[in-house]
Amino acid sequence: MTALILALLAGAVVGLALGALGGGGSVLAVPALIYLLGFTPAAATTASLVIVTVTSLTALYAHARAGHVRWSAGAAFAAAGILPAAAAGAAAAHLPQPALTSAFAAIAALAAVKMLRPADTARSGSGAVHPGRAAGAGAGLGALTGLLGVGGGFLAVPALVTVLGFRMEAAVGTSLLVITANSLASLATRSGAAVSLDWAVVGPFIGAAILGAWDGKRLAAKVSGPRLQRVFAVVLLAVAAFMLADAVT
């Protein structure tokens, strides 16, 4: 199977996850770029940030039209993560590749476990929010974005539900704003790094992801959030196990 076809297929899946779940695209994009398309971990994390930024903007537009984006709260949450994302992005270039792969696998497994426990997403979200908790959660997500090349949406959605008390549809839409801001901050620090991207692969990947994001938005309107999360979590656990095994052997 050619690299172009693999890029189109992987991009469609990444976009579907971002559009339907408000996150999860990057935790599939990085392993797809490494194991299917032959990118190094450093190039894969940078390419993932580019892919996720563009796709998230597209999905954000679709969710904003539906009124599912809390702009002020989402901007404040994202602002707390901008500096950590930039700092971690600069540090990532100096870390060994097996360490980055192992850390990525651990975070992916954690995200899968959270998605397999969807009961927390049922909160109605009328309670008060502690500013310190919100800032801490936003900073942590920003650091993960910069270090591992992930948008952080797979952790942003549960954080927005449990910390800010959002309903699920608002958490999904708002997480796309957080993903975009964090990814842009991390990309800014990586722009001078000596990582060249194969745009003949990355370009089609982005195009397929954008189309997939629109399909994901429509899918989210038809299938329950908890069911989508469970299916995605099983796939994510398998990816995490494979990456961890590869890193330690």
Image (cartoon, helix red, strand yellow):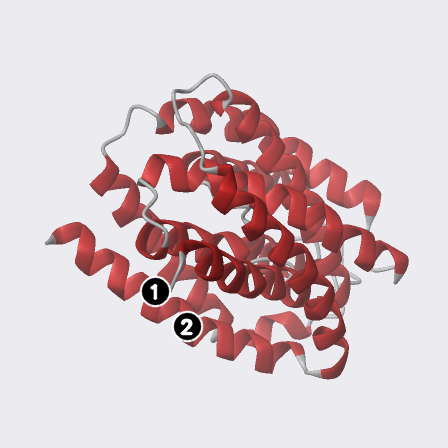
At label 2, the amino acid type is Val
Q: Residue lying furthest front in this view?
A: 2
Residue 148 seen by the camera: no
Task: Decide if residue 105 is on the left or right side of residue 11.
Answer: left
Q: Residue at x 73, y 36 (%)?
A: 76
- Residue 88 vs 242, above or below: the answer is above
In depth, the one of 249 and 163 nearer the eye is 249
Q: Position of residue 79 (x, y in %)?
A: 68, 32
- Quarter of the image that includes the C terminus: bottom left
Q: Position of residue 114 (x, y in %)?
A: 47, 67
In depth, the one of 235 and 3 nearer the eye is 3
In depth, the one of 137 and 172 nearer the eye is 172
Q: Are marks 1 and 2 in contact (CB under 8 Å)?
A: yes
Q: Quadrant of residue 241?
A: bottom left
Q: Which residue is disc 2 drawn over?
A: 235
Q: Residues within 10 Å of mark 2 (few under 14, many from 20)?
A: few
Q: Position of residue 196 (x, y in %)?
A: 42, 28
Task: Decide if residue 26 is on the left or right side of residue 122.
Answer: left
Secondary structure of residue under mark 1: helix
In depth, the one of 58 and 88 nearer the eye is 58
At label 1, the amino acid type is Val
- Quarter of the image that includes the N terminus: bottom left
- Residue 67 vs 181, above or below: the answer is below
Q: Residue at x 67, y 49 (%)?
A: 56
Secondary structure of residue under mark 2: helix
Q: Residue at x 74, y 64 (%)?
A: 214
Q: Residue lying furthest top in this view?
A: 192
Residue 239: give its label.
Answer: 1
| Spatial separation of the CA atoms under disc 1 and disc 2 | 6 Å
Q: Quadrant of residue 193?
A: top left
